[in-house]
Structure formats: structure tokens, C-alpha cells
Amino acid sequence: MKLATDLALRSHCVKAHVGAVLTQDTRIISIGYNGPPAGTHNCDEEWPEAGCPRDSKGSCSLALHAEENAILYAVKSGARLEGATLYTTLSPCIACARLIFSAGIKQVYFDKSYAKYKGIASDEGVDFLNKFGVPTIQLLED
């Protein structure tokens, strides 16, 4: 989790800094942090005051989540994700949870609650993963 926390510092997002690490048999196989696709822009440089434009749900219209970036980097590198463990500084949103499940990741540890961060009733991603057999555990209560 320390590495995920350090990776979050690399994010150029004005709103949130999130990091993720994928491991397989205690070895790091991929890393990611939230931000726009490579080669597009950096929010803190282009929109330093308010961040990038928001979508209809109030989220960044351009950025990828840390989990998405870690999964995409692993796939681009040819890493096998079946049975991997994910460490992330913010619990997965529902969209990321579907990707995590579909990628065959078998365990997720997180630091802070996405629901608390977004001001929503429950951690839908955590609920989804736990329901479908992917233990998703908060390391420390926030």
C-alpha cells in the first residue's frame, strides 16, 4: 500500500490523487495512478484552478482511474492478471470493479472509501466485488 500511496503523488489531477499496484505471487506486475491517457494533457497544467471539464456525473471527463491504468499497463506489457492482487488508495468505483472482476484479479485491498470521497451512500464497487467472490478489504478505517 505504501507504493500505491507514493504513486498517487504522481497524479496530475487537481481533484484527487489515487495510486494502484497489481501484484502476482508477491511480485509487482503493474502500477497506475489516476490521470488522462498518455499524450493528451495534464489537468494541473492546463486547468490548474478547477481541473478538467466534468462529465454528466460530476467526474473527470478525460482521466482514467488508477486501477484502469494499472490494468491497461499490465495488458500492454503482456502480464497475466488471473489471480493477481490489487492495492489501491481509494476503493474501486463500480466501473473499475467490473474491470477488476473481468480481469481475474482475486483480491483487493484499499485505503480510503470511494463512497465517502464522492458523498454517496455505499461503496458499490466493493459490494460488487465481495458479492462475486473477490474479497475487497479496507486496511484502515477512514
Image: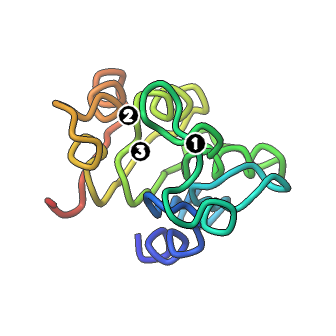
x, y percentage for residue 90?
A: 37, 53
Check disc 3 and report the residue beneath it.
Answer: 107
Q: Answer yes or no: do the residues labelled 1 and 3 have beta carbons within 8 Å?
A: no
Q: Residue at x 40, y 36 (%)?
A: 93
Residue 134, compared with residue 14, is above or below; it is: above
First in sequence, mark 3 or 2: give its number: 3
Q: CA distance from mark 1 to mark 3?
A: 33 Å
Mark 1, other Cα within 10 Å: few <14 / some 14–19 / many ≥20: few
Instruction: Tell which circle, 2 or 1, labels the residue nearer the N-terminal end.
Output: 1
Q: Secondary structure at mark 3?
A: strand
Residue type pointed to by label 2: Val
* Quadrant (top left, top right, bottom left, bottom right) of the C terminus: bottom left
Residue at x-position 61% and y-position 60%? 47
The answer to the question of whether label 3 and label 2 lie on touching residues, with beta carbons closer than 8 A, is: yes
- Residue under pointer 1: 53
Indicate left or right for 67 with 107 as reference: right
Residue at label 2?
A: 134
Quadrant in the picture for residue 15: bottom left
* Residue at horizontal 49 percent and vertical 57 percent from the top: 50
Q: CA distance from mark 2 to mark 1?
A: 33 Å
Q: CA distance from mark 3 to mark 2?
A: 5 Å
- Nearest to the eye among marks 2 and 1: give it: 1
Residue at 75% from the left image edge and 49% from the top image edge: 37
Residue 49 rendering spot, x and y as whole percentages: 51, 64
Q: Which of the marked residues, 1 or 3, is nearer the chain's N terminus?
A: 1
